[in-house]
Image (spheres, grey):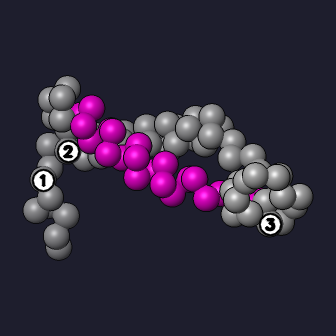
């Protein structure tokens, strides 16, 4: 796996994991006091830096598995089928 394709695969995995991690721990303003001038569904504390860190770690773990399968073992998608 070349460097460019590795970066592209990691980037795609990172975005997919981000969309999985984003909803965790979110409390809307409907569940607490609504701040004037904001939407009732807006999150109180989105914790984006924490979620970005968790996303980076999870994406690195998933990418390590993908790289091991395709880069080190040199297998293809056809090898996944029984």
Measured as percent of width and height from the top left, residue 71 is found at 20, 38
Q: Is residue 78 above or below residue 64?
A: below
Q: Is residue 75 above or below residue 78?
A: above
The reply to whether callout 1 and callout 2 are in contact (CB within 8 Å) is yes
Mark 3 highlights which residue? 30
Q: CA distance from mark 1 to mark 2?
A: 6 Å
Mark 1 highlights which residue? 76
**Residue 47: quarter of image:** top right
Q: Is residue 21 left or right of residue 43?
A: left
Q: Is residue 47 above or below residue 3?
A: below
**Residue 3: quarter of image:** top left
Measured as percent of width and height from the top left, residue 34 is found at 84, 58
Please indicate, yes or no, whether residue 26 appears anywhere in the rendered image.
no
Which residue is found at the position 20% from the left and 44% from the top? 70
Mark 2 highlights which residue? 70
Q: What SS does tag 3 mark?
A: helix
Q: CA distance from mark 1 to mark 3?
A: 48 Å
The reply to whether callout 1 and callout 3 are in contact (CB within 8 Å) is no
Q: What SS does tag 1 mark?
A: loop
Residue 59 vs residue 66, the one in the foreground: 59
Measured as percent of width and height from the top left, residue 13 is found at 36, 47
Residue interval drawn in magenta: 6-28
Q: Is residue 27 left or right of residue 58?
A: right
Which residue is found at the position 43% from the left and 37% from the top? 60
Q: Is residue 58 inside the magenta stretch?
A: no
Q: Is residue 17 inside the magenta stretch?
A: yes
Which residue is found at the position 83% from the left and 52% from the top? 35
Please indicate, yes or no, whether residue 9 appears anywhere in the rendered image.
yes
């Amino acid at each position: 796996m070349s460097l460019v394709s590795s970066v592209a695969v990691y980037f795609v995995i990172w975005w997919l994991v981000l969309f999985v991690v984003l909803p965790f721990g979110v409390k809307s303003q409907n569940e607490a006091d609504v701040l004037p001038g904001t939407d009732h569904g807006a999150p109180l504390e989105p914790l984006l830096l924490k979620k970005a860190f968790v996303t980076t770690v999870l994406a690195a773990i998933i990418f390590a598995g993908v790289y091991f399968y395709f880069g080190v073992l040199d297998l293809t998608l056809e090898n996944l089928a029984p």
